[in-house]
Amino acid sequence: MQFGAGRFLRAFVDRFVQHANDAGQAVGRVVIVQSTPGSRADLISAQPEGFHVLVRGLIDGELVERAEPVRSVSQAVTAQHDWPAVLELARSATLQYLVTNATEAGYSLDAGDQVDSCPPVSMPAKLTQVLWARFQAGAPPLTILPCELIEGNATKLCDIVGGLARHWQLPTAFIDWITGNCQWLKNLVDCIVTPGPTDHALSSTDKLLVSAEPYALWAIQRPTAGTARLFQHPAIQIVDDLAPYYLRKVRILNGLHSAMAAKFGPAGFETVLQVLSDRDACRWLRALLYEEIVPTIAYHVDDVALFADQTWDRLRNPFLAHKLADIMLNHAAKVLVRLQPTRDEYQKLFGRPPKKLSEVLA
């Protein structure tokens, strides 16, 4: 069960499930729950044959360009109109995984949410109702993978759900089942995904077409007890400590994205590629990256300069039309995670504010 119908999860999780099924792992198919307003669920339902992900970019200097069919989605429903059906799906004995992607602001609660709200407003309340329905049905516990770019995402979401269950005065046995039986896997997703090109041959028939870079990483922190209950995929890495992966990705890749959107969006630039094609903009960004961002995490992350170089090459992918307007969505919440800590640590290290980052945060 996947909370989120956006292009990232479709090009990342749904594609990986397709790969695993193709490799004979029998992972099953994905039910998408659209939890925000919009027509994505209708679009997905209108294409029962699936959709395509255009994987385009460079690997070791070699051009990669392929269209991958994704047929791993069985159905798409909306929380607003189909909540009883969502709870019924939650009771299925064959359900194994629950994935969420609600952005950095997605863990906020709504004071009006109740145990019988249909549906509740907040994502944690929706998740709590889903798990409560499953527990009552006696179905097996789930592996839960929150894909939000929040450090310690699974631990934080588990704590929120447990707190909400206590607030709703649900049984202690249920809370123990949430925290002790369900497996909450802290993880980090890393892949640049953008809308599919309108001039591609598939765009006339595939309204869900998306583009993704060849690079993909799904880093999963090893559970303290047992092993991760998860399918296998080349992009999935089980690691002992997620912190360095999180730090380098959020501060470098996401930090650069948010900084360039805030700096160059108002100047008339529309895409990342336009920014990277401008000599003065490149000079400004490289100085931000190597003089202000990299020094603040060099003591915490191995090979940070190498990752910075790789990130710069990824940003210059000529096939990805990554819109600055999309990057600016939920900008205030993103700044607190992606940019503010860098400014604070730079100030602490050097005794002065970082010049370029201060321009962005002014």
Image (cartoon, rainbow, N blue to C red):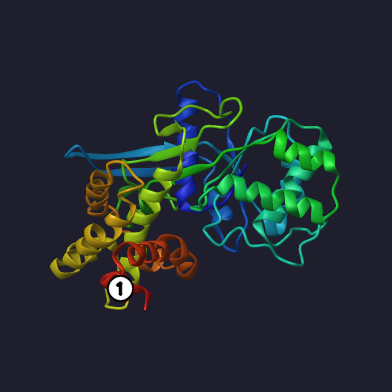
| 284 or 141: nearer the viewer | 284
Look at label 1 and name its amino acid: Lys
Place of residue 133 in the rendered image (x, y in percent of width and height, measured from the top left): 79, 43
> SS for tag 1?
helix
- Which residue is pictured at 20% across the width and 61% down the height? 286
- For the N terminus, the image quarter is top right
Left/right placement of residue 155 relative to residue 189 reads right
- Asked whether 279 or 309 is in front, the reply is 309
Quarter of the image for the C terminus: give it: bottom left
Q: Residues within 10 Å of mark 1 (few under 14, many from 20)?
A: some
Residue 112 appears left or right of 184: right
At horizontal 28% and vertical 55% (from top left) the residue drawn is 294
Left or right: residue 213 compared with residue 168: left
Residue under circle 1? 263
Q: Residue at x 26, y 72 (%)?
A: 355
Residue at 29% across / 65% down in the picture?
350
Task: Choose top left, top right, bottom left or bottom right for residue 176.
Answer: top right
312 and 321: which is toward the camera: 312
Q: Nearer the viewer, residue 19 or 184?
A: 184
Can you say whether 3 is above or below 231 in the image? below
Q: Residue furthest left?
A: 279
Asked if residue 314 shows in the view, the reply is yes
Residue 353 to residue 99: above or below: below
Across and down, in percent, residue 141 comes to 71, 33
- The image shows residue 143 at horizontal and vertical percentages of 62, 35
The percent position of residue 53, horizontal first and vertical second, equals 39, 44
From the viewer's perspective, tell me whether residue 241 is left or right of residue 40. left
- Is residue 32 visible from the viewing direction of this image? no
Q: How many labels, in total?
A: 1
Q: Vertically, is 259 above or below 43?
A: below
